[in-house]
Image: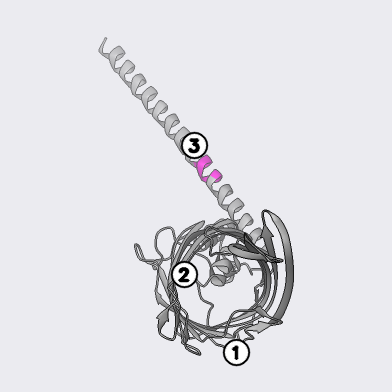
């Protein structure tokens, strides 16, 4: 009887050990399958990153051929995807060549990011503006005087050449030279009937703008990137042509701060600026305080979208020390735009603006081609 019990106990223990070993083997096989699936996903991700790099002209990182392929894949992926120790959570982390991303290029164009030292970017830009205003007026028809209105429709086209050059110490030089064309049509209306029309057009070079930007603060856990900018708008441009006002005439000095907080694939941008215009011929235009806020969204490495709300208030102008009533303005504009990489170094930007207040332009559309040169100048 004792022998039978011992035999049964040994058989039970052997059965238990066998079942445990089988369970362990099954667990190991499951872990091996998961590791294989992980390695497959890593390799697929690496291939996708390399394909995107080839599309935007970025050179792939070299690896040591003595290492195993799977180890190379893991190390390369970690280099591309891991956050650096000095980066804020959610910040966009890219290698040096990945500055070609449309998002970073768009942020540089808007002034939220600066170029590296020695890097030159040239941007030809074309902007069309439409403005319509209606003013009540007394209209003389023959010997009679009627209550009517004067409608002014203005079309403007500006061709601007902008240059940006990265300087040492996280700074940047900015130069702009515009050429402007403007056509103004005036309609005199009485009882919804047009009694007279006139049309004039003029063109000429605008004011040369020179600016200097500096990165004041780097993005941290709570703090954003902060860029300061000082711009001088000269009075070198033509103020009128053929009786059509082209703007300009005054020296202006503008100071601004631009903040950016990034959470890939979104970057939030906000800015404040103050514009002081110097007196000329007893005329003192009012100062301008402006603010803007918006978001930039990376739809892909080659394409980005942006939405911006811009507002500004200009105080009353002065003539011989006396304020001119009704000369203050409130300007509000909503801008939607997109950017896409046409080729390595060349970005195409298209945007449209809609005026939200009476003093703002009714509609505007802008097309530009920022071109960045590969080799730094110094």
Expressed as whole percent of the image width and height from the top left, the position of residue 256 reads 44, 75
Q: From this view, report whether residue 54 is shown above or below residue 6.
A: below
Residue position for label 1: 236
Near-viewer residue (313 or 371)? 313
Callout 3: SS: helix
Apparent side of residue 327 relative to residue 203 in the rendered image (left or right): left
Distance between the alpha carbons at the discs numbered 1 and 2: 28 Å
Expressed as whole percent of the image width and height from the top left, the position of residue 255 reads 43, 79
The residue located at (54%, 61%) in the rendering is 358
Residue 152 appears anywhere in the view: no
Q: Which quadrant of the structure image shows residue 105?
A: bottom right
Distance between the alpha carbons at the discs numbered 2 and 3: 78 Å
The residue located at (47%, 33%) in the rendering is 26
Q: Could you classify mark 1 by the number of other residues whose Cα lies within 10 Å: few (under 14), some (14-19), or many (20 or more)? A: some
Give the magenta part as a residue range.
32-37
Expressed as whole percent of the image width and height from the top left, the position of residue 210 reads 54, 85
- Numbered mark located on residue 75 in the image: none
Q: Are marks 1 and 2 in contact (CB under 8 Å)?
A: no
Residue position for label 2: 326
Q: Could you classify mark 2 by the number of other residues whose Cα lies within 10 Å: few (under 14), some (14-19), or many (20 or more)? A: few
Q: Could you classify mark 3 by the number of other residues whose Cα lies within 10 Å: few (under 14), some (14-19), or many (20 or more)? A: few
- Numbered mark located on residue 30 in the image: 3
Q: Which dot, 2 or 3, sits closer to the camera? A: 2
Near-viewer residue (208 or 344)? 208
Outermost residue to the front: 143
The residue located at (58%, 63%) in the rendering is 135
Apparent side of residue 170 relative to residue 139 in the rendered image (left or right): left
């Amino acid at each position: 009887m004792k022998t039978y019990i011992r035999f049964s106990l040994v058989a039970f223990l052997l059965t238990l050990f066998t079942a445990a070993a089988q369970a362990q083997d099954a667990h190991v096989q499951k872990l091996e399958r998961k590791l294989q699936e992980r390695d497959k996903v890593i390799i697929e991700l690496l291939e996708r990153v390399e394909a995107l790099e080839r599309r935007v002209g970025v050179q792939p990182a070299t690896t040591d051929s003595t290492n195993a392929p799977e180890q190379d894949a893991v190390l390369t992926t970690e280099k591309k995807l891991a956050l650096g120790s000095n980066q804020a959570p959610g910040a966009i982390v890219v290698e040096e060549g990945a500055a070609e991303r449309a998002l970073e290029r768009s942020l540089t164009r808007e002034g939220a990011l600066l170029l590296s030292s020695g890097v030159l970017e040239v941007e030809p830009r074309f902007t069309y503006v439409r403005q319509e205003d209606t003013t009540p007026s007394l209209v003389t028809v023959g010997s009679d005087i009627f209550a009517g209105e004067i409608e002014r429709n203005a079309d403007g086209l500006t061709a601007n050449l902008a240059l940006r050059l990265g300087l040492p110490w996280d700074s940047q030089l900015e130069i702009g030279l515009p050429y402007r064309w403007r056509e103004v049509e005036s309609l005199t209306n009485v009882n919804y009937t047009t009694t007279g029309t006139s049309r004039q057009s003029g063109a000429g070079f605008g004011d040369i703008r020179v600016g200097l930007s500096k990165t004041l603060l780097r993005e941290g856990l709570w703090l954003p990137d902060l860029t300061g900018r000082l711009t001088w708008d000269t009075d070198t441009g033509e103020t009128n042509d053929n009786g059509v006002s082209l703007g300009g005439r005054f020296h202006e000095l503008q100071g601004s701060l631009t903040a950016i907080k990034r959470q890939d694939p979104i970057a939030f941008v906000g800015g404040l600026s103050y514009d002081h215009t110097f007196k000329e011929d007893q005329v003192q235009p009012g100062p301008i305080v402006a603010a803007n806020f918006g978001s930039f969204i990376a739809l892909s490495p080659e394409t980005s979208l942006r939405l911006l709300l811009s507002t500004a208030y200009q105080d009353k102008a002065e003539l011989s020390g006396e304020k001119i009533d009704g000369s203050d303005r409130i300007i509000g504009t909503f801008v939607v735009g997109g950017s896409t990489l046409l080729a390595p170094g060349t970005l195409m930007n298209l945007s449209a603006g809609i005026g939200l207040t009476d003093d703002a332009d009714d509609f505007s559309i802008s097309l530009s081609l920022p071109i960045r040169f590969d080799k730094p100048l110094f």
